[in-house]
Amino acid sequence: MTEPTEPFDLDSLPDTRVMQRSLLTVAQKREGLAFHEAAHALVGMTYGMSLARVRLIETEADGPAPGLIQTGATTWNPTWVAEFAFAVQCAAGPIAERRHLAEAGLLTADVAAQVAGDNDRDVAVATLARSGYELALSGPVPQGGATWDQVTERAREDVSALWPEVAALAEALLTADDLTITPADVLRLTGRPNPAPGTPPASPASE
């Protein structure tokens, strides 16, 4: 089990991909990120994670390559969560982003490479390693751990089951004045209450 001791920003680790020139327009990238963060939030909440907020972040880059940097963040309150469940909600973001882009006819091979979710995978691996839980990126299932393929398979199932809610939350995020939504917004839009901080969640077994 893992329990962040302070609000945990899922996308807090450095992500060098945000410095690449996106192949999408600003609006297309913003929409993809909205689905990405909405999926993090909803999948995490189904496993008992307590949401603090979800936001899209847009800042002007300085230096030799000026332009708009677009990213997002899903921030959690201190919460007990099963390791496999934590990894699943990490994987859910890029899976939802790619599904949205595919349905919009925008998911070329090059775009898919830019939204592969390497940062989310690295967050899962690094965070769970601190509690001794191994996520294997290849090879056999480690003792007491899981493979990333198992994680992404479960995440695809969860994103599919939650897709109407993911879409509703993404739309709300895109239209919010400050590009931020709260647990109260999630409750209003989906009827899904926010788990209390520290509440032990359901523990999905790795397959």
Image: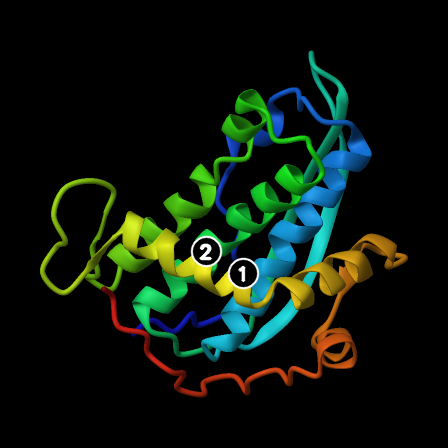
Residue 49 location (% of width, % of height) = 50, 75
Q: Nearer the viewer, residue 207 or 19?
A: 207
For label 2, the SS is helix
* Residue sitting at x 33%, y 73%: 82
* Residue sitting at x 68%, y 65%: 164
Q: Is residue 59 visible?
A: yes
Residue 101 location (% of width, % of height) = 65, 39
Residue 68 horizontal side relative to residue 143, left or right: right
* Residue sitting at x 25%, y 42%: 137
**Disc 2 and disc 1 in contact, CB within 8 angstroms:** yes
For label 1, the SS is helix
Q: Residues within 10 Å of mark 2 (few under 14, many from 20)?
A: some
Q: Nearer the viewer, residue 12 or 159?
A: 159
The numbered mark at residue 156 is 2
Marks 2/1: CA–CA distance = 6 Å
**Residue at the limit of the structure toward the top, as seen here:** 64
The numbered mark at residue 160 is 1
- Amino acid found under the numbered disc labelled 2: Arg
Q: From what the image shows, is residue 198 above or below residue 121?
A: below
Residue 174 horizontal side relative to residue 3, left or right: right
Residue 15 location (% of width, % of height) = 52, 36
- Amino acid found under the numbered disc labelled 1: Ser
Residue 92 location (% of width, % of height) = 50, 55
Residue 45 horizontal side relative to residue 23, left or right: left
The numbered mark at residue 42 is none
Colour theme = rainbow
Q: From what the image shows, is residue 77 above or below residue 73?
A: below
Q: Is residue 7 visible?
A: no
Quadrant showing the C terminus: bottom left
* Residue sitting at x 62%, y 38%: 102
